[in-house]
Image: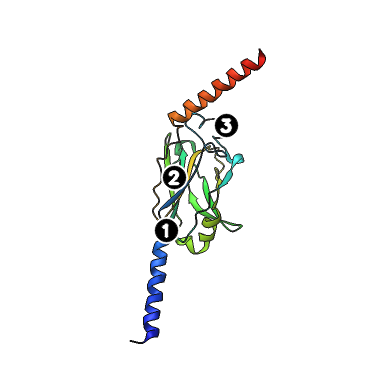
C-alpha cells in the first residue's frame, strides 16, 4: 500500500473522528425573567405575557459553539387552541414560528399544543443545518407571528429550548424559583429594610 493511500485513509479517519468529537449534546433555554417569557403566575397578564397578534415578538438564543449532526427548536406555549371552535366559525389558533438564516426569516410552521395546558411544539432543524449552523454558533434568532388568521387568539410562551445533538429539553412548565433563591431574596429585602430603618433614626 502506498504511503499516500495510508495518509489519505488516516486523514479521513481524523475528519470523521473530529466530527464525532464536536457532537456534544447541548441545550440552550430561554425563559422568564427574560423578555416576555411567561411564568405560571403571570401567564394571563395582558399584553406583557398573554399576547395578541399586535404583540408578536422575537428572541435570540445564546450561541452554541461547534458543529452539529442534529438540532431542534422546542417552544413551550400555553393554551394553543389549534383545533379552533368550528361552532363559532373559528378555524383555529395559528401562531407561526420563524427562524433567521442571517437576516432572512423562514417559517418552521405553527405552534401545536392543547387547551389550558403547557405543551412543547418541536421543530426539527436538522434539514437546515447546512444553512443555519453559523446562526446557531452566533445565536439563533426566533420570531413568533401570533394569530396569523386574525381570529383574536392570544398565546403565552414559557420557554424556548434549542437542542443540538440530543441535548435534553426540560419540562414544558414554566420555571419555578428554587426555595434557596426565595430565601436569599427575602433575606436581602429584610436587610434593606433594617438598613433603611437605621438611616432614618
Extreme residue in the right direction: 200
Describe the element under mark 3 as helix, strand or loop: loop
Name the residue tied to disc 3: 46
162 shown above or below 12 = above
Q: Do the residues labelled 3 and 1 touch (CB within 8 Å)?
A: no
187 shown above or below 102 = above
Residue at 49 percent across and 51 percent down: it is: 109
Foreground disc of the pair 3, 1? 1
Name the residue tied to disc 1: 70
Describe the element under mark 2 as helix, strand or loop: loop
Residue at 38 percent across and 76 percent down: it is: 10
Q: Distance between the residues labelled 3 and 1?
A: 36 Å
Residue at 48 percent across and 36 percent down: it is: 88
Which labelled disc corresponds to residue 112? 2
Q: Residues within 10 Å of mark 3 (few under 14, many from 20)?
A: some
Which sits in the foreground, 59 or 78?
Answer: 59
Q: Earlier in the sequence, mark 2 or mark 1?
A: 1
Residue 42 is situated, as x and y percent measured from the top left of the image, at 52, 30
Residue 6 is situated, as x and y percent measured from the top left of the image, at 36, 81
Which sits in the foreground, 1 or 138?
Answer: 1
Residue 119 is situated, as x and y percent measured from the top left of the image, at 42, 40
* Location of the N terminus (image quadrant): bottom left
Horizontally, is 187 left or right of 104 in the view?
left
Amino acid at each position: 500500500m502506498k504511503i499516500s493511500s495510508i495518509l489519505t485513509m488516516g486523514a479521513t479517519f481524523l475528519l470523521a473522528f473530529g466530527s464525532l468529537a464536536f457532537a456534544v449534546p447541548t441545550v440552550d433555554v430561554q425563559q422568564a425573567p427574560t423578555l416576555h417569557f411567561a411564568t405560571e403566575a403571570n401567564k394571563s397578564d395582558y399584553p406583557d405575557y398573554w399576547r395578541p397578534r399586535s404583540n408578536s415578538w422575537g428572541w435570540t438564543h445564546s450561541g452554541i459553539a461547534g458543529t452539529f449532526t442534529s438540532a431542534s427548536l422546542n417552544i413551550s406555549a400555553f393554551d394553543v387552541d389549534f383545533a379552533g371552535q368550528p361552532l363559532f366559525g373559528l378555524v383555529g389558533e395559528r401562531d407561526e414560528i420563524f427562524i433567521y438564516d442571517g437576516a432572512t426569516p423562514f417559517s418552521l410552521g405553527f405552534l401545536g399544543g392543547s387547551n389550558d395546558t403547557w405543551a412543547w411544539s418541536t421543530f426539527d432543524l436538522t434539514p437546515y443545518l447546512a444553512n443555519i449552523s453559523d446562526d446557531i454558533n452566533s445565536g439563533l434568532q426566533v420570531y413568533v407571528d401570533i394569530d396569523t388568521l386574525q381570529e383574536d387568539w392570544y398565546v403565552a410562551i414559557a420557554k424556548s429550548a434549542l437542542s443540538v445533538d440530543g441535548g435534553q429539553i426540560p419540562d414544558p412548565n414554566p420555571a419555578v424559583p428554587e426555595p434557596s433563591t426565595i430565601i436569599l431574596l427575602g433575606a436581602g429585602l429584610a436587610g434593606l429594610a433594617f438598613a433603611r430603618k437605621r438611616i432614618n433614626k
